[in-house]
Amino acid sequence: MEIIIKDFLNFRKMITPFIIRILFWVGVAGCVIVGLAMMWNSLRGYGSEPALFLVGLLVLVCGPVLVRVYTEILILFFRINETLTEIRHLLASK
């Protein structure tokens, strides 16, 4: 337990990947809400824009995928850091 706290306080253990996972789900929820709202508003008669319905559908389908790609890129940096740290520890132990 003491080692975990020491690693956390010395910035050896990162909390940002956990925060990124939370932001992923917030982003997905936001895309779904915005996409459905755009589709609903296009059907309710606010200009009766068929293009607004298609944009809403695009946000609903592609938005979560783009959020996933962005968060995977962010997490990739932390995974690279963890792997390099493991390599450093292995080389130091030899």
Image: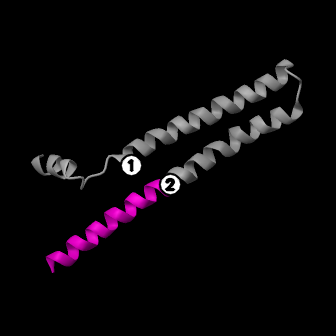
Q: Which residues are magenta?
A: 72-94
- Mark linked to residue 88: none
**Mostly what secondary structure, the magenta segment?**
helix
Number of labels in the image equals 2
Vertical comparison of 93 with 59: above or below? below
Q: Of helix, strand and loop, which one carries label 2?
A: helix
Q: Does residue 39 show up magenta in the picture?
A: no
- Between the residue at mark 2 and the residue at mark 1, the CA separation in whole angstroms equals 10 Å
Residue 66 at x, y = what percent? 62, 49
Q: Nearer the viewer, residue 36 or 49?
A: 49
Of the 4 image quadrants, the one containing the C terminus is bottom left
Residue shown at 34% from the left, 63% from the top: 81
- Mark linked to residue 17: 1
Of the numbered discs 2 and 1, the one sitting upstream in the chain is 1
- Asked if labels 1 and 2 touch by Cβ distance under 8 angstroms, the answer is no
Residue 82 at x, y = what percent? 32, 62
Residue 88 at x, y = what percent? 24, 72
Residue 28 at x, y = what percent? 57, 38
Q: Does residue 87 show up magenta in the picture?
A: yes
- Mark linked to residue 72: 2
Please identify the quarter of the rendering in which residue 58 is found: top right
Three-letter residue code for mark 1? Pro
Q: Residues within 10 Å of mark 2 (few under 14, many from 20)?
A: some
Q: Of helix, strand and loop, which one carries label 1?
A: helix
Three-letter residue code for mark 2? Glu
Residue shown at 42% from the left, 60% from the top: 77
Residue shown at 21% from the left, 74% from the top: 90
Instruction: Say whether residue 93 is left or right of residue 72.
Output: left
Residue shown at 51% from the left, 50% from the top: 71
Vertical comparison of 61 with 33: above or below? below
Instruction: Say whether residue 83 is left or right of residue 59.
Output: left
